[in-house]
Image (cartoon, rainbow, N blue to C red):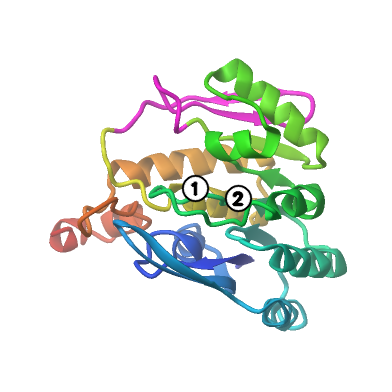
Amino acid sequence: MKHVLTIAGSDTCGGAGIQADLKTFSAQGTYGMSVVTAVTVQNTQGVFGCQDIDPEIIKGQIDAIFTDIQVSAVKIGMVSQIPTIHAIADKLEQYRPQNVVLDPVMISKSGFDLMQPKAKDALMKRLIPLADVVTPNLPEAEVITGLTINDLSSMEKAAREIRKMGAKNVLIKGGHLVDDATDLLFDGDNIVLLHSNRIPTKNTHGTGCTMSSCIAANLAKGKTVEEAVRTAKDYITMAITHSLDIGKGVGPTNHFYELYTKAGIWDEIKD
């Protein structure tokens, strides 16, 4: 079994952050480990507060994993402040893990800033160059590049700009497009478009976390970047299609729907 590490923030209600990552790692048949970068106060209705973990504790968590357990892939999620980014980058440069997936989490669906504005430059200079795959959504890609992105042409332009920053592969997620949810993958030479219909549901909490962690898990299992991204696209589409109507706001995706179905227990537990 491959071992996959998430370096990200904690989500109180379990739909996003390290909780979503660990569920995804398990659903993909890998062993999940975590380094907590921040503790958020949130539920399906929004994010109401955040406390960052001390950078030395973050470094200590990373050391604890890499000095004991083989790591086949790393997913990086919420990194809200400059010292956190430097702590993570220093340790990744020290241990040089394969298959680093960076999900540049910046703003929650409720509009809460999950990254300090000044931290953007540190993310671009320290973490993007270490990434095998970067997975911004349209608003995040706009912040990183300064471009207005509203169609496939501008998505391609943004992907090329982010590739110039040092990432080996760039996946621009099109969930915020008006007509469909087409994603664009760029490896420096080729453009791959991954089409899907928009799913009529409000329950999309943790979709970005889930997709990026699924990519990391499948890279750990030996798939190519395109294969891992296609698997993740199928997985997140399934998880959104069968999302969970939990809470009073934006509910989470269903990370274990396929497993529940195969076990023959979904009809029994879904209510």
Q: Is residue 133 above or below residue 194?
A: below
Answer with left or right where residue 123 lies relative to residue 26.
right
Magenta span main SS: loop
Position of residue 251 measured from the top left corner of the image (x, y, whole percent): 28, 53
Q: Quadrant of the C terminus?
A: bottom left
SS for dot 2: loop
Q: How dense is the environment of label 2, judged by Cα within 10 Å: few (below 14), some, or many (20 and up)?
A: many
Q: Which residue is mark 2?
A: 103
Q: How dense is the environment of label 1, judged by Cα within 10 Å: few (below 14), some, or many (20 and up)?
A: many
Q: Is residue 5 above or below residue 198?
A: below
Position of residue 58 measured from the top left corner of the image (x, y, whole percent): 68, 77
Q: Amino acid at mark 2?
A: Asp
Tell me which label, 2 or 1, sits earlier in the chain: 2
- Residue sticking out furthest to the right: 94
Answer with left or right where residue 179 lies relative to residue 55.
left
* Residue closest to the eye, 69 or 105: 105
Region in magenta = 175-199
Q: Quadrant of the N terminus?
A: bottom right
Q: Which residue is mark 1?
A: 208
Residue at 61 percent of width and 49 percent of height:
104
Distance, label 2 to label 1, CA atoms, is 7 Å
Mark 2 near mark 1, Cβ–Cβ under 8 Å?
A: yes
**Residue 99 image-quadrant placement:** bottom right
